[in-house]
Amino acid sequence: MLLHRNLPTLLQSETCGMSVPEIQLVLQAGTLGGRFTTLEGILDQVYEELSEKVFAGDSADSGDRSNFEKFLSNLKAVS
């Protein structure tokens, strides 16, 4: 998928992967399914899904949790 920051919307196919190296985000093909949205919409969806589902239990290492919370903070800052 080619992203152009000056385009208001984009079409992401079901088999599309996506990479945002500035925040170390890599989505494998098919991760989010197909959608017609904005880049911000995709990033918001990734944030919502990750913040709700990952490290929900008590077994997470505190270092891993801290690194992941920093990643989520960076993700939210760009979305």
Image (cartoon, rainbow, N blue to C red):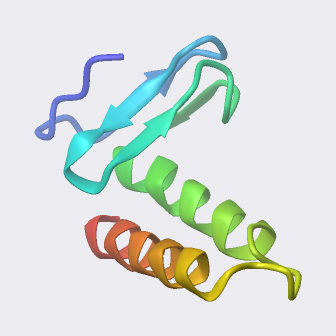
The mark tally for this picture is: 0
- Residue 13, by quadrant, is top right
Quadrant into which the C terminus falls: bottom left
- Residue 34, by quadrant, is top right
The residue that appears at 66% across and 64% down in the rendered structure is 50
The residue that appears at 15% across and 40% down in the rendered structure is 5
For this view, does 7 lie left or right of residue 76? left
**Residue reaching furthest left?**
6
Could you say where residue 60 lies in the image, as x and y percent from the top left? Answer: 75, 79
Residue 18, placed above or below residue 43: above
For this view, does 67 lie left or right of residue 34? left
For this view, does 60 lie left or right of residue 70? right
Residue 79, placed above or below residue 60: above
Could you say where residue 38 lies in the image, as x and y percent from the top left? Answer: 39, 44
Quadrant into which the N terminus falls: top left
For this view, does 47 lie left or right of residue 78? right
Front-lying residue, 41 or 26: 26
Front-lying residue, 69 or 10: 69
Could you say where residue 66 lies in the image, as x and y percent from the top left? Answer: 50, 84
Residue 29, placed above or below residue 79: above
The residue that appears at 75% across and 75% down in the rendered structure is 55
Front-lying residue, 55 or 59: 59
The residue that appears at 32% across and 72% down in the rendered structure is 74
Could you say where residue 42 lies in the image, as x and y percent from the top left? Answer: 49, 48
Residue 20, placed above or below residue 14: below
